[in-house]
Image (cartoon, rainbow, N blue to C red):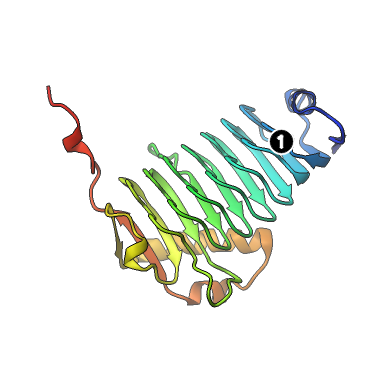
Amino acid sequence: MIVLNAKGLYYKQLNSKIREEVAIGSEEIVVKNVNGQRYIGDGITGKTRLTLKGTPGNDMAAYMNGLEVHVEGNTQDSIGNTMNDGKIVVHGSSGDTVGYAMRGGEIYIRENGGYRVGIHMKEYQEKIPTIVLGGKVGDFLGEYMAGGVIVVLGLGLEEDEEIVGSYCGTGMHGGVMYIRGDVEDYKLGKEVKVVELSEEDRQQLSHYVKDYVKYFGGNYEEILAKPFSKLIPYNKRPYGNLYCGW
């Protein structure tokens, strides 16, 4: 295991050290004293396990292609931006635009996400990006979502707290969202609807909840005992009439 100390390091210096270790095949890297350094893990291909102790800055793991990143703390905005493959596990909360344009891999967040989580997510064939959040999320969840899976568990919320914000699924035209509990109609974008879960949906949810509990703990049976709302888009081209024909 390689241990790096990020204290006082400019983000370029830190990222250079991480890239060097991944390039020579280091299997596990632990970075201590992370304090807002941006772009950690960006564009890196590999199988290294990277543990970050502290709070990484914006765009962590953008364009990442295969690493397993564990954050022992919170993260700032846009983690997993256009991520292609790999895994992110956050033992805290994350900021806005988690998984922006994400096209592969998995993100697990123990607590909350901010605004516009999963915006522009997409999928292709076997590449199905996934975001699982244990707490709540802000407005515009899954905005313009074109593929992938979002799961919001709403664990530990106070009685007056709401699991999702407004404009949920606005512009959504692909993929699926599973929200534990009910979502009021006024919170939904006009492009989405709530439907019953199939047996395949239940199996898929079971897999994601098992992984969530594996990373963060919790009661698997209790989480799944509460009904989920399944959100899907009405059609695949909600704005087709805005484009010119040839």
Residue 44 to residue 229: above or below:
above
Judge left or right: residue 60 versus residue 190.
Answer: right
Residue 112 position by quadrant: bottom right
Question: Where is the N terminus found, in terms of image quarters?
Answer: top right
Which residue is the site of mark 1?
Answer: 48
The image shows residue 163 at horizontal and vertical percentages of 49, 65
Question: Where is the C terminus found, in terms of image quarters?
Answer: top left
The image shows residue 96 at horizontal and vertical percentages of 55, 46
Judge left or right: residue 181 versus residue 89.
Answer: left
The image shows residue 182 at horizontal and vertical percentages of 40, 71
Tell which residue pokes out farthest to the left in this image: 246
Which one is nearer the viewer's eye here, 41 or 128?
Answer: 41
Amino acid under label 1?
Thr
The residue at 79%/28% (across/down) is 14
The residue at 67%/58% (across/down) is 215
The residue at 62%/73% (across/down) is 219
**Mark 1, residues whose alpha carbon is within 10 Å: few (<14), some, or many (≥20)?**
many
Residue 179 to residue 176: above or below:
below
Which one is nearer the viewer's eye here, 94 or 105?
Answer: 94
